[in-house]
């Protein structure tokens, strides 16, 4: 499955939803669209990311240590979106994740994150990004 399918569903839920569960689900699907997109690109670039719950943190760390300012900002925003996803999925007393305007904003944010990650990872700086992440991983392992 292609991660943009999660984004497509998130957009439909955020735009056409009428119930809190739809807005919560839109936020959740938006996060997973951005997360899986980053995960797939990192794996395509040759990085081994675990296949368990730690993958969320690994995607963040890899992007954050890419030596690319835009990817580092995207990593931070993905982390923020993950927090909002946790609120939507687990904190049933939170009203902010049940509002259409918030769901729409977060879905749009996820779409922009996907665009940024794709643009930066397919840019002329791709090789520099790979080298920077590999150097970070080497320092991380030896430190």
Image: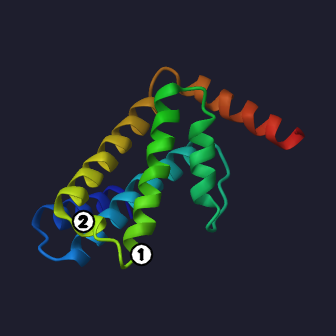
Quadrant where the C terminus sits is: top right
Nearer the observer: mark 2 or 1; the answer is 1
In the rendered structure, the answer to whether residue 62 lies left or right of residue 71 reads right
In the rendered structure, the answer to whether residue 60 lies left or right of residue 31 reads right
Quadrant of the image occupied by residue 130: top right
- The label on residue 9 is 2
Q: Residue at x 45, y 49 (%)?
A: 78
In the rendered structure, the answer to whether residue 113 lies left or right of residue 35 reads left
Quadrant of the image occupied by residue 6: bottom left
Other residues around mark 2 within 10 Å, as few (<14) / some (14–19) / many (≥20): some
SS for callout 1: loop
Residue 95 locus on image (x, y percent): 28, 70
Answer whether residue 37 is visible to the viewer in this image: no
Looking at the picture, tell me which residue is in the foreground, 72 or 135.
Answer: 72
Q: In this picture, is 122 found above or below 34?
A: above
Q: Residue at x 60, y 26 (%)?
A: 67
Question: What count of labels does the image hold?
Answer: 2
Q: Residue at x 27, y 54 (%)?
A: 107
Looking at the picture, tell me which residue is in the foreground, 85 or 113.
Answer: 85
Residue on which the image places disc 1? 91
Residue 83 locus on image (x, y percent): 46, 59
Quadrant where the N terminus sits is: bottom left
Residue 28 locus on image (x, y percent): 36, 66
């Amino acid at each position: 499955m292609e991660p943009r399918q999660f984004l497509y569903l998130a957009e439909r839920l955020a735009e056409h939803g009428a119930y809190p569960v739809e807005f919560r689900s839109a936020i959740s699907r938006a996060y997973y669209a951005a997360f899986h997109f980053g995960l797939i690109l990192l794996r395509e670039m040759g990085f081994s990311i675990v296949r368990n719950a730690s993958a969320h943190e690994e995607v963040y760390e890899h992007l954050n240590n890419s030596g690319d300012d835009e990817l580092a900002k995207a990593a931070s925003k993905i982390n923020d979106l993950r927090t909002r996803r946790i609120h939507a999925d687990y904190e049933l007393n939170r009203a902010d994740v049940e509002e259409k305007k918030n769901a729409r904003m977060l879905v749009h944010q996820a779409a922009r994150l996907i665009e940024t990650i794709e643009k930066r990872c397919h840019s002329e700086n791709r090789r520099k990004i790979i080298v920077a992440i590999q150097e970070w991983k080497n320092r991380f392992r030896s430190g």
